[in-house]
Image: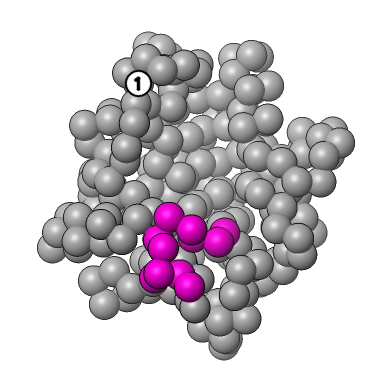
Amino acid sequence: MRRFPVMLFAAGFGTRMRELTAHRPKPLVPVAGKPLLDHALDLCSADIVTHKVVNLHYLGDQIADHLRGQNVALSREDPILETGGGLRAALPLLGQGPVMVLNTDAVWTGQNPLAQLAAAWDDRMDALLLVAEVRHATGHTGTGDFLMDADGRLSRANGAPGMVYLGAQILRTDRLANVPQTVFSLNLLWDQMIAEGRAFGLVHKGGWCDVGRPESIPLAEALLA
């Protein structure tokens, strides 16, 4: 199986967590006795990942202290750069070629999501996003993000029932150099890739819970239990 560098997003303000993130960054909020960030790092096994990069902004020193002594590179942002700008800023640490990207505000059960992505990646893809049907996306509110055809190619759901993006993907990064904005979302790249038929989805083989709100923590702990 091919291995990839991985970017873990940990810079956000966590405003949906309300008082839980007043003095603590969301990646350090505990779920089942372990910070969310550690749940994400547990997925980054050496047979899948070459090296790990975590971006920092809000209360970033707490995350840096938490990771001290671990083999994790840090990409500090000031100002915060959103997902696209943050990934581009971390490229000197990640290196050339496709990278894995993982949000740190979810928990997973079943097959390792990064292993699933690595096994399914091929050269016809510019992006491979892990997805699930809305009914299997615990803690998610709203409709799906994407529609997926029989070949796995993605299109925007545009309000129709569809597949939920779970916050794990493999992405080619060469298009980042062409974005004029400093602060931008990876949605810009996804739309280009969708238009060219080079954005694909993969259904997660297991459970998933979005831990973006306080009320999602007991849902996540029940899933893990």
Q: For this view, does 13 lie left or right of residue 165?
A: right
Residue at point 70%, 58% (across, down): 80
**Which residue is tagged 1?**
162
Would you say residue 111 is visible in this rendering? no
The residue shown at (46%, 45%) is: 168
Q: Is residue 32 visible?
A: yes
Q: Is residue 222 left or right of residue 9?
A: left
Q: Position of residue 181 (x, y in %)?
A: 82, 39
Residue 46 position, x and y percent, is 48, 65
Q: How many marks?
A: 1
Q: Quadrant of residue 218?
A: bottom left
Q: What is the x, y in percent for residue 150? A: 37, 12
Its colouring scheme is one colour
Q: Is residue 188 above or below residue 220?
A: above
Q: Is residue 125 above or below residue 182?
A: above
Q: Please give the range of residues in magenta.
A: 12-22
Q: Check the picture and name the quadrant holding the C terminus.
A: bottom left
**Residue that appears at 57% across and 59% down:** 12
Q: Is residue 9 left or right of residue 107?
A: right
**Kind of residue at disc 1:** Gly
| Type of secondary structure dominating the magenta stretch | helix
Q: Closest to the observer: 202 or 187? A: 187
- Label 1: few (<14), some (14–19) or many (≥20) C-alpha neighbours in 10 Å: many
Is residue 125 in the magenta section? no
Where on the picture, by quarter, is residue 170? Answer: top right
Residue 126 in the image, given as x and y percentages of width and height: 63, 29
Relative horizontal placement of residue 28, taking residue 175 as reference (left or right): left
Looking at the image, residue 213 lies above or below residue 124: below
Instruction: Check the image and report above or below for 159 versus 120.
Output: above
Question: Please, what secondary structure does the residue beneath circle 1 have?
Answer: loop
